[in-house]
Image (cartoon, grey):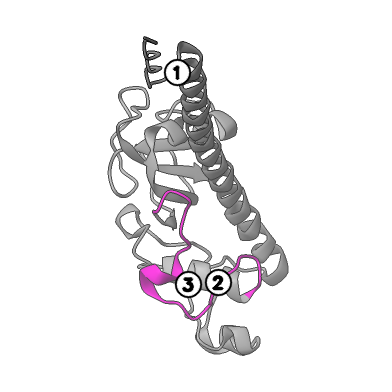
Amino acid sequence: MKRPMPKAQSGFTLVEIAIVLVIIGLLLGGVLKGAELIENSRVRQAVNQINGVTASFYAYQDRYNRIPGDDGNAATVQARGSSWAAVGAGNNNGLLEVNNNQAFTGAGEGQEFFQHLKAAGFITGNPADAGAAALPRNPFGGLVGVSSQAMMGALNGNKVCLNRVNGKAAQAIDNQLDDGNGATGQLRASQAAAPANGALATPYNEDQEYTICMRM
């Protein structure tokens, strides 16, 4: 009698398992690399925003001989054209007046600052947007604002600020634009929701979010 041939056992061979593991490794590597590329792109966008607002601030003064946000009176500003019809006006005292607590609310002359830059065509957006809605969004889900009040007791003058910046990105932005230390130089950082007077006592923590401000 012929004995029945034993059935081949089903399952994966070692070679097949090795191939699957290699594919999984490549997929995981691609996901991690993609996340890193996205984060690097956000950092570049944030750096461009800071530089762009700063350049617009000085270009506006060159064109109008006024400070954006402080420019007034309302009738003079709104008479410049249709894009200016719904913008507010500052008190035209030669100073941008926005304190740290107002940086991301549009209060003080913060709303007018961005309305004027938009109406002049220096940055994109609707000049009629008011309050916090007048402020541009930054790549980290927060806002771009301005402040003229001293930050950390030392960073005086007009500043462009970004909030809700994660610690890893804040470090990268500081490295590109300044000295890499959030407590010194022309860029300062705090863990408060708005620019703060307390110094950054420790290195950037990647588990924290920061408000960063750069002198214009």
Residue at 42 percent of width and 62 percent of height = 97
**Mark 3 secondary-structure assignment:** helix
Is the magenta region chiefly helix, strand or loop?
A: loop
Task: Give amino acid for label 1.
Answer: Ile
Q: Counting residues from the N terminus, which is met first, the one under dot 3 or under dot 1? A: 1
Residue extending farthest to the front is 1
Q: Are marks 1 and 2 in contact (CB under 8 Å)?
A: no
Disc on res. 17: 1
Question: Can residue 36 be seen by looking at this rendering?
Answer: yes
Q: Is residue 37 magenta?
A: no
Question: How far is disc 1 from disc 2 in space, using C-alphas?
Answer: 54 Å
Segment colored magenta: 120-141
Establish if 112 lies above or below 146: below
**Mark 1 secondary-structure assignment:** helix
Counting from the top left corner in percent of width and height, residue 90 is at 47, 74
Disc on res. 112: 3
For label 2, the residue is: 125
Counting from the top left corner in percent of width and height, residue 104 is at 36, 59
